[in-house]
């Protein structure tokens, strides 16, 4: 194991785009007309009591950490009871409650929720006053404990409506034991990738399995990184900003063609299009596929399914050979927490999140869950082995970026995901795929009632 010696502030100074849902610092679109219309959450200070209902997305990191801290927080505050309802599709439970006004006190509704839609509808409390209050150490302003480049991704029109916790890294994963046995090494570019895939295929192993039921895995781990590698990060920025023609640019087409090449050469595991995330990842862990695209939550998510002797390691998406982009470029993501406008106990909600983001708790999350955090100094620990390579990649990255448009324009994202599935099924050429994506972007551009956002 090694210690990551560079703080997230240094790592993310070059953030060019926001993080995986929600999106980042929206620059346009309707918002609060004035500060008078913004309802601020309490600061989490003073006497905390009553009931605190927390709902949380039960994804790759589970909810056990959040439940343990809820119990600890309640124990520190006599008169408070705190519960955490976790579910892999928690957004399905949250949506009707937000509509009816029966809001939970504090929520982490996951990637399936339209976070910015909640902001536009005035469903969330602003957290500016809370962030300006003191942190749990009793001396630091709470906002100063967060990486500022990540915190700003949860802002709109000068107000912070959401709070980040962990930072995810995206890329490709392999079993080092299997690879060492066969003499394989992670490819640095697409030429090396093609050569490697032929060697893997010759062994009777599928080079890659993927999470076909969730096409965004392929969009965010292959398509967009390859577009950025081919034409530079400006290519992805333009696409997220809905610039005309950006989804059928030369770089985007090159990225789609690479996916089609892997498809046509039989480098994708047969049946992957129909697989869930856990099904495809299980195939990978069983050695039936040599690689799987995923985020840094993979080991935590699949820990119970990990066969004896199998471990997972990360490498960055191989660059496009001869591309114009930054070869050190890395994709990251965050998923936010928020206080609903009709929270019955918002003071306890803020206090709980202050407790959870204290430095010692953030360090524990890094050690236990294998994820970097948005809290400054939380990386100063002995990192889990699976986090060593992603952390080193971040340390070396000159460009750190993320996907924003998916949460800004969910209808557009749904159409692009459908196009990706059709292309992976062989029903679309790369050119047809790009045309369909551009048409989806055009629909979003032409929708005058759809709030527009800009990266950067």
Image: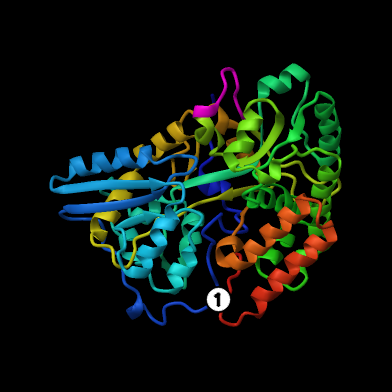
Whether the magenta-drawn stretch holds residue 307 is answered as yes
Q: Is the magenta stretch mostly helix, strand or loop?
A: loop
Mark 1: few/some/many CA within 10 Å (<14, 14-19, 20+): some
- Residue reaching furthest to the left: 79
Q: Is residue 146 left or right of residue 266?
A: left
Whether the magenta-drawn stretch holds residue 23 is answered as no
Q: Mark 1 points at which residue?
A: 451
**What quarter of the picture does the N terminus occupy?**
top right
Q: Where is residue 29 in the image (x, y as percent from the top left)?
A: 53, 77
Residue 134: which quarter of the image? bottom left
Name the residue nearer the viewer: 194 or 391: 194
Q: Is residue 50 left or right of residue 98?
A: left
Q: Residue at x 13, y 48 (%)?
A: 79
User: Quick check: 338 above or below 305?
Assistant: below
Q: Tell me the SS state at disc 1.
A: loop
Q: Position of residue 98 (x, y in %)?
A: 37, 66
Q: Which residue is drawn at 82% across and 43% down?
A: 262
User: Quick check: 175 above or below 222?
Assistant: above
Q: Residue at x 31, y 51 (%)?
A: 54
Give the magenta part as a residue range. 304-312
Name the residue nearer the viewer: 200 or 128: 200
Q: Where is residue 397 in the image (x, y as percent from the top left)?
A: 65, 44
Name the residue nearer the viewer: 158 or 348: 348
Q: In this view, does 118 lie to the left or right of 46?
A: right
Q: Residue at x 84, y 61 (%)?
A: 431
Q: Is residue 4 visible?
A: no
């Amino acid at each position: 194991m090694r210690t990551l010696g560079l703080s997230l502030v240094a790592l993310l100074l070059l953030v060019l785009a926001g993080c995986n849902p929600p999106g980042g610092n929206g620059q346009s679109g309707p918002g609060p007309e004035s500060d008078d219309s913004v309802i601020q959450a309490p600061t989490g200070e003073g006497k905390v009591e009553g009931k605190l209902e927390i709902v949380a997305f039960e994804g790759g990191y589970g909810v056990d950490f959040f439940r343990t801290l809820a119990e600890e927080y309640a124990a520190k505050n006599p008169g408070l009871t705190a519960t955490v309802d976790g579910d892999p599709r928690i957004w399905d439970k949250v949506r009707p409650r937000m509509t009816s006004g029966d809001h939970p006190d504090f929520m982490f509704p996951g990637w399936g929720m339209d976070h910015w839609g909640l902001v536009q509808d005035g469903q969330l409390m602003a957290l500016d006053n809370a962030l300006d209050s003191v942190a749990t150490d009793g001396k630091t302003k709470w906002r100063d404990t967060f990486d500022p480049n990540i915190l700003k991704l949860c802002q709109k029109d000068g107000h912070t409506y959401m709070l980040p916790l962990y930072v995810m890294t995206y890329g490709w994963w392999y079993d080092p034991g299997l690879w060492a046995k066969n003499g394989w090494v992670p490819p640095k570019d697409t030429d090396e990738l093609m050569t490697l895939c032929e060697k893997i295929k010759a062994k009777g192993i599928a080079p890659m399995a993927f999470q076909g039921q969730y096409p965004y895995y392929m969009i965010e781990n292959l398509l967009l990184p390859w577009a950025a590698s081919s034409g530079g990060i400006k290519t992805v920025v333009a696409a997220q900003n809905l610039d005309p023609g950006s989804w059928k640019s030369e770089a985007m087409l090159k990225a789609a063609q690479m996916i089609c090449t892997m498809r046509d050469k039989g480098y994708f595991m047969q049946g992957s299009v129909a697989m869930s995330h856990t099904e495809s990842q299980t195939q990978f862990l069983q050695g039936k596929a040599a690689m799987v695209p995923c985020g840094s939550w993979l080991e935590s998510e699949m820990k119970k399914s990990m066969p004896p002797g199998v471990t997972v390691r990360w490498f960055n998406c191989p660059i496009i050979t001869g591309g114009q982009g930054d070869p050190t470029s890395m994709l990251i993501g965050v998923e936010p927490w928020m206080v609903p406008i009709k929270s019955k106990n918002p003071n306890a909600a803020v206090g709980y999140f202050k407790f959870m983001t204290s430095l010692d708790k953030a360090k524990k999350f890094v050690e236990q869950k294998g994820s970097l955090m948005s809290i400054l100094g939380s990386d100063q620990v002995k990192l889990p082995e699976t986090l060593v390579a992603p952390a080193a990649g971040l340390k070396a990255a000159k460009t750190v970026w993320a996907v924003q448009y998916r949460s800004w324009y969910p209808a557009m994202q749904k159409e692009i995901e459908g196009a990706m599935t059709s292309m992976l099924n062989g029903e679309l050429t790369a050119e047809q795929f790009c045309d369909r994506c551009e048409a989806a972007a055009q629909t979003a551009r032409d929708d005058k009632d759809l709030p527009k956002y800009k990266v950067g």
